[in-house]
Amino acid sequence: MIMIFEGGRPLPIRTDRSNAFANNTMRVRLPAIVDEVIALNPDYPPDVLSRLGRLRDEVADGECMARFELSPASDTAAWSRALKRQREVIGNEPTWHNAEWFFAETYAYRCLIEAARWAENSRDPFLPKKLEELQSAALWRLIEGATQPLDAPEYELPRAIALALWANRIDLSYSASLERGIDISPDDLLLDDREALLADLSETGVWPEGLMGQKPVYIVADNTGSELAMDLALSDCLLRHVTPTVAICLKAHPTFVSDATAPDVWLLLNEMERRGRDAAALAKRLRQRWRAGQLRFLPHLYWNSSRFLWDLPNDLRRKLNEARLVIIKGDANYRRAVGDAIWPAHTPFKRVLNYLDAPTLCLRTLKSDPVVGLPAASRAAQLDRVDPDWRVNGRRGLIQFKAQTSKSQ
């Protein structure tokens, strides 16, 4: 892998053939996702079906991105600026097959909801897929397991973190990861910083004394369904042991097929109540926390944008930097955090995320090439030998933590 550095960071992955996975995403995976949207929404008006078909063909064929126009909206100017930046990066009109991958993928989903006229009808084009997962027996077994009491409270948070990690495999946009479920092999977890996290949360280093503070915990959510359910179970645990307030950051509109929005939260809570027993009891506690203002669901257009995490808008930057803990979930958010670039895999995690002041925990199963923080320079080469697709096949996971960034750094 060729790494070119600019300003201390490697350049982002592009969708051309310099990265086979990104290129395949734009040529094959994304057009197939648009086809699935068409198949699952046959009652869309002819205009919508035609626009979706046109988007599918343009992405698959690598057409010029600017051919697909966005209607006037609150984010249109921001996307126009981002497209202008791509022209500067590429030195020409960017196409779906030569742009920076994070931009191309996020913009493709923005074009998809434009084609589906979501702003006019509020109809989630991915809802049929989401509803299908809500009927999955595996989801309800997962919730039942997550809510069982443990012998001692010091085990609850590590369990909740592990479940929130491995539920990230249940990604409706990526079958390679989805098919693995949450059956875990001993060598699937590449890095486990839970002990360092618990020590940081407690002033005494002993659970549970000294844990409860006044600052909120922010969870940057990824997928709805199984993963969101485990994020809610993690929130319940955090509210009992770590913080008086948890805020879950959500997408402002549907994207990446299964990424969580505010309607997805209420859809899941309603279904949890309907199922009864442990799921209903958890939903009741969460609703009580929400009514008390202790649990917040915060959609923001930034999380739908192509901007990296060091480019936070001021309102989000202030909130996250003042948090007791920021939990970043999933592969796409990991790409946002590390600049969607291929670093030397042993680059220290705290160095890459030194722009974020707050203690930060990343929970991510690997579905793309970027990875940092491995314990030795040789580890990536070892993994390459035993599993050439380890970076992208959704099998391995990371629990990565960095303490508060010193103001002097």
Image: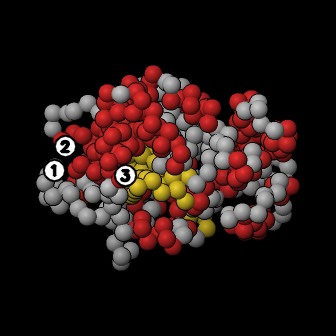
Could you tell me the amino acid type at mark 2? Answer: Glu
Residue 322 coordinates in the image, percent (x, y): 36, 69
Task: Look at the image and tell me whether residue 154 can be seen.
Answer: yes
Q: Is residue 371 left or right of residue 255?
A: left
Disc nearest the viewer among 2 and 3: 3
**Residue at x-position 52% and y-position 49%:** 262
Relative depth, front residue between 130 and 364: 130
Crowd around label 2: few <14 · some 14–19 · many ≥20 (10 Å): some
Task: Look at the image and tell me whether residue 142 can be seen.
Answer: no
**Residue at x-position 62% and y-position 36%:** 127
Disc 3, SS: helix
* First in sequence: mark 3 vs mark 1: 1
Give the residue at mark 1: 208
Q: Is residue 171 above or below residue 316?
A: above
* First in sequence: mark 2 vs mark 3: 2
Give the residue at mark 2: 154
**Residue at x-position 57% and y-position 34%:** 130
* First in sequence: mark 2 vs mark 1: 2
Relative depth, front residue between 275 and 165: 275
Could you tell me the amino acid type at mark 3? Answer: Trp
Relative depth, front residue between 268 and 212: 268
Residue 290: which disc? 3
Disc 2, SS: helix
Q: Is residue 97 above or below residue 392?
A: below
Q: Mark 2 touching mark 1, by CB under 8 A?
A: yes
CA–CA distance between discs 2 and 3?
A: 25 Å
Q: Is residue 105 left or right of residue 274?
A: right
Residue 94 coordinates in the image, percent (x, y): 80, 58
**Residue at x-position 44% and y-position 24%:** 138
CA–CA distance between discs 3 and 1?
A: 24 Å
